[in-house]
Amino acid sequence: MAKKVRIEKDACIGCGLCNASVPDVFDWDDDGKMKAVVEDVPEALEEAIDGAAADCPVQAIIVE
Ligand code: SF4
């Protein structure tokens, strides 16, 4: 089963790092925070998404 990705909005500080590294998955929401524009992690982007999750300064990117 494909992994899922989501953003914990309460935790996101809107630094923009994840959008800069994986713009096909992470995009700005109207509230100045980030949203995941896909729920299922595409296999080709799995490594990049895991990297973005590891690099998020507040651990707001949840991959499970
Ligand atoms: S890297 Fe983390 S804190 Fe920064 S915009 Fe993305 S989810 Fe928000």
Image (cartoon, rainbow, N blue to C red):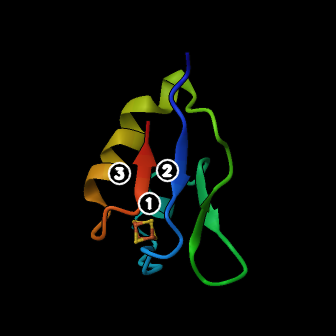
Mark 1 vs 3, N-terminal side: 1
Numbered label tally: 3
Answer whether labels 2 and 3 touch (C-beta < 8 Å).
Answer: no
Q: Identify the residue at image location x=64%, y=41%.
A: 39
x then y, percent, for residue 16: 46, 72
The residue sitting at 36% across, 51% down in the picture is 52
- Kindly report which numbered mark, 1 or 3, lies closer to the viewer in this rendering: 3
Mark 1 neighbour class, 10 Å CA radius: few under 14, some 14 to 19, many 20 or more: many
Classify residue 11 as left or right of residue 37.
left
Which of the numbered marks, if any, corresponds to residue 53? 3
Distance, label 2 to label 3, CA atoms, is: 11 Å
The quadrant in which residue 31 appears is bottom right
Dot 3 falls on a residue whose secondary structure is helix
Task: Name the N-terminal-most of marks 2 and 3.
Answer: 2
Q: Quadrant of the N terminus?
A: top right
Q: Residues within 10 Å of mark 3 (few under 14, many from 20)?
A: many
Q: Secondary structure at mark 1?
A: helix
In the rendered image, residue 25, in percent from the top left (x then y), is placed at 59, 48
Figure quadrant of residue 34: bottom right
The residue labelled by disc 2 is: 22
Question: CB at mark 1 closer than 8 A to ligand 1?
Answer: yes
Of the residues shown, which amino acid type is indicated by label 2?
Val
Is there a contact, CB below 8 Å, between mark 1 and mark 2? yes
Ligand 1 resides in the quarter of the picture at bottom left
Question: How crowded is the residue under tag 2: few (<14 C-alpha within 10 Å), some, or many (20+)?
Answer: some
Q: Is residue 13 above or below residue 60?
A: below
Q: In this figure, which residue is indicated by the disc labeled 1?
A: 18
Residue 10: where, in percent of width, then height?
49, 76
Residue at 36 percent across and 32 percent down: it is 47
